Image: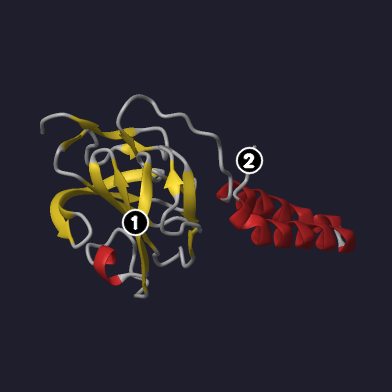
Amino acid sequence: MRFAPDGSFFMSAVAAATLLLAWLSRWTLIVTLPLAALVFWFFRDPERTPQGDGLVSPADGEVIEICETEHPYTGKALKVGIFMNVFSVHVNRMPSAGTIEYLEYAPGKKWFANADKASLENERMYVGYSSADGPVLLTQIAGLVARRIVCRLKKGDRLERAQRFGMIKFGSKVDVYLPLSLKCTAEIGQKVTAGQTVIAVRGQK
């Protein structure tokens, strides 16, 4: 099993604490082993293969929002909001191949990530890239539990479809703004898998 390098501190700390407490008393393993297993589970990073042609989900979770909206980078676009719970894989992936053009960090609040105002008021990281279908925008949104956004990109980076680009530690929400020329195949309530589930394809709406 592969683990996200951004979880190294947490995994090392819980492993060290488990060993130290076990040295003092083996009975502590009743508590520390399940806790250690849970932390390692949080930072798992399995390999993913797209399930067909089209743009894939940038995050594991549940589709909670699909609506037309606007952003300065994309212009009019179709926004798909994906809620990641604490048990989701937290690593985020590129929906399609493209070149990074726009990066903006916005400090903000820590509302529940599935609240309507979270997309505009919570701490968030905007990632915009040019693709064969037009500009695509991703928003990594921190929440009440998830308080650390990781984005390893810089302008000019060229990434492939389903490639890892960052994570939100302990889950939260990712919004993806799609060109209106694409047909959204995602549905409200659908469970999606990052880098695997196709959420949009070329074609008429």
Percent x, y of residue 112: 34, 65
Q: Secondary structure at mark 1?
A: strand
Q: Which residue, given by chain and number where applicable, does mark 1 sit on?
A: 101
Asked if residue 197 is positioned above or below residue 86 in the image, the reply reads above
Q: CA distance from mark 1 to mark 2?
A: 29 Å
Residue at the (63%, 40%) spot, across then down? 2
Instruction: Name the amino acid type tagged 1.
Output: Glu
Residue 2 circle label: 2
Quarter of the figure with residue 14: bottom right
The residue under the point 38% across, 53% down is 100
> Residue 111: x, y in percent?
33, 69
Tell me which corner region of the image, top left, top right, bottom left or bottom right, holds residue 54: top left
Q: Is residue 153 left or right of residue 185?
A: right
Q: Of helix, strand and loop, which one carries label 2?
A: loop
Give the mark nearest the N terminus, 1 or 2.
2
Q: Nearer the viewer, mark 1 or mark 2?
A: 1
Quadrant in which the N terminus is drawn = top right
Amino acid type shown at disc 2: Arg
Kindly give the residue lying farthest to the right in the view shown: 23
What residue lies at 44% left-to-right and 44% top-to-bottom? Answer: 159
Q: Residue furthest front?
A: 156
Q: Is residue 91 left or right of residue 205?
A: right
Q: Are marks 1 and 2 in contact (CB under 8 Å)?
A: no
Q: Is residue 189 visible?
A: yes
Q: Is residue 170 visible?
A: no
| Residue 99 placement, left or right of 204 | right
The residue closer to the viewer here, 133 or 27, is: 133
Residue drawn at x 22%, y 33% is 185
| Residue 25, x across and y down, in percent | 86, 60
Assess disc 2: are there few (<14), some (14-19) or many (≥20) residues with their C-alpha within 10 Å of its C-alpha.
few
Within-10-Å neighbours for mark 1: few <14, some 14–19, many 20+:
some
User: Nearest the camera: 148 or 203?
Assistant: 203
